Amino acid sequence: MLIELEEQYDCIYRYCYYRLHHVQMAEDLTQEVFLRYFEKARSENERPLPYLYTIARNLCIDEFRRKKTEYMQDSFEKELVQDMTGEHAQSVLVDTMALKQALLALTEHERELILLRYVNEVSVADLSEIFDVSRFAMYRKLKGVLKKLKNHMQG
């Protein structure tokens, strides 16, 4: 189980960064997530992944409420422009901005589902546990979100 938790560290960090758009705060909250996990429920919880994401989600919500105005800047665009060089930079930037616009057309909950399922590769079973819905309902939600995203990208 320890190896699995070590593998999840980057995923939890990515999730916190996605929620807060602040590198240092995402690092701090990721550490806090694992500290709380090891303090409270390591031996009690058979499925650590949903519990880790629940802790991370709650900490991010608390931090966002506390520091809302500080994290409203989207540092992702600044980092993207600084990191890009070469002849394909403009094409990548256009594609990235189109994807970002499509993602912004989704609700916050839908974007969170996309991040967890397709970026962090959280299983549908774990997602259904995190969001307290049946697997069938989670499959339907994911299918609907992908359809909405596809329609926006084509239009």
Image: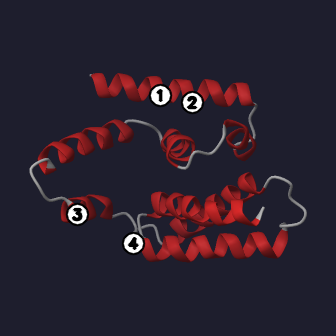
Which residue in the structure is indicated by mark 2?
Answer: 142
The reply to whether callout 1 and callout 3 are in contact (CB within 8 Å) is no
Indicate left or right for 118 with 98 as reference.
Answer: right
Closer-to-camera residue (8/114) = 8
Label 3: state its secondary structure.
helix
The reply to whether callout 2 and callout 1 are in contact (CB within 8 Å) is yes
Which residue in the structure is indicated by mark 1?
Answer: 146
Label 4: state its secondary structure.
loop
* Precedes in sequence: disc 3 or disc 4: 4
Residue 141 vs 55, above or below: the answer is above
Under mark 3, the amino acid is Asp
Which residue in the structure is indicated by mark 4?
Answer: 70
The residue at the point 90 percent across, 62 percent down is: 44
The reply to whether callout 4 and callout 2 are in contact (CB within 8 Å) is no
Q: Position of residue 43 (x, y in %)?
A: 89, 66
- What distance separates the C-alpha of mark 3 from that of mark 2? 31 Å
Q: Position of residue 127 (x, y in %)?
A: 67, 42
Q: Tell me which corner region of the image, top left, top right, bottom left or bottom right, holds residue 62.
A: bottom right
Q: Which mark is residue 83?
A: 3
- What distance separates the C-alpha of mark 1 from that of mark 4? 31 Å
- What distance separates the C-alpha of mark 2 from that of mark 1? 6 Å
